[in-house]
Image: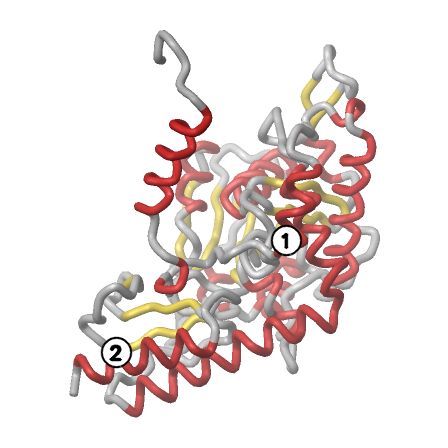
Amino acid sequence: MLNKGITEEELFSFFSCKKREDLDHNFILSSMCTLPHDVAVRAHCMFMETNLGDPGLFPGTADLERQLIERFGTLFHLPGAGGYATSGGTESNIQALRLAKVIKKVAAPNVVLPESAHFSFKKACDILDLEMRPVPLGADLRICPDLAAELVDKNTVCLVGVAGTTEYGMVDPIADLSKIAVLHDVFLHVDAAFGGMVVPFLERPIPFDFALPGVTTIAVDPHKMGMSTIPAGCLLTRDPEMLDALNIATPYLTVKHEYTLAGTRPGAPVAGALAVLDYLGMDGMKAVVAGCMKNTQRLIAGMETFGFPRAATPDVNVATFVAQTVPTPWKVSWTRQGHLRIVCMPHVHRDRIEAFLADIGEMHA
């Protein structure tokens, strides 16, 4: 720390230099986050000092959190769902597994999950001392339900499915996993951190939510396709009282028990998430998703015209290709199998797709 402070002009001149070192979103094609919507930024700024970890001090902000959970519950076919706002998919997934372990107390607990599961599940299992039982994927890059059923036993505390896999944009056959969960009376968690704000707005939504009787919890991230400010996630539960199993005493706060993982929890991104949902509504979100899916289809068609075949036909707006390099300054990513990966987020407009295709076409001409 400096002995003497610096001027505001000096401070923000330094910050501006650092900000210019960040990558330009015009060239970021690899991220599942995007530029926040203007209404999210405005709402975030209004609630920047709020702390949902002590909700009695901020009852208005706490009510916004309740409304956000209600919106997602309704979107996921269960208006009375329980849940709370998290920092994102990692926290939501940790809490879901923590909840599953508390509910079903066994000596050697295990979790059955697809090989495509997000790396946050590795963190969760390490923290919670859970055995991971990865299920191989089928040729369609989705979990194989029959193999999942074979791995479920009396010590299985949770079965996991993914709605919108990080690498290939696939939605697991959650309806089949739901049947397995009901048959074996096992907790089923759906990681819809990405797809939860895509699939419901598709022309032909794929079943993944509480409409399926076996689904116990769902993770969804408004800071991804919901265009909220970072960090904004939600964990939804079928039973509104279920999270009480995680309660610990908080005697010096305005609430005497808390089931959340974080103590201090920012209210600002919650307000931002709710702002976008209410501002755009169903019609607006459908338009956003339709645009992203159209851009994904255009990208796939363009890449294949240049001789770069798709690695998979995605369910959501993630495109993968058999390709080796891309021109600078475009920022893409690569899957574990070595496929080029691009996410067509709301900031990846049609002109960005055309510019990328023009550059890659010229590079490989």
Residue identified by numbered label 2: 359
Tell me where residue 203 sits by quadrant: bottom right
Name the residue at 38% across, 40% down. 16
Q: Position of residue 158 (x, y in %)?
A: 56, 48
Farthest residue, direction top: 3
Mark 1 highlights which residue?
218
Q: Is residue 16 left or right of residue 306?
A: right
Q: Position of residue 272 (x, y in %)?
A: 66, 47
Q: Nearer the viewer, mark 2 or mark 1?
A: 2
Q: Look at 42% across and 67% down and name the residue there.
A: 343
Task: Tell me whether the residue at label 2 lies in contact with that at label 1, contact meaning CB atoms closer than 8 angstroms.
Answer: no
Q: Quadrant of residue 122?
A: top left
- Frontmost residue, 146 versus 276: 276
* Residue depicted at x 52% and y 69%: 171
Circle 2 packing at 10 Å, graded few (<14), some (14-19), many (20+), is some
Q: Is residue 146 visible?
A: no
Asked whether residue 210 appears in the rendered view, the answer is yes
* Sequence-first tag of 2 and 1: 1
Give the x, y percent position of residue 146: 49, 69
Q: Is residue 168 above or below residue 90?
A: below
Q: Give the side of residue 157 with respect to residue 182, left or right.
A: left
- The amino acid sitting under disc 2 is Asp
Indicate the amino acid at tag 1.
Ile
The quadrant the N terminus occupies is top left
Report which quarter residue 184 is drawn in: bottom right
Asked which secondary structure carries label 1, the reply is: strand
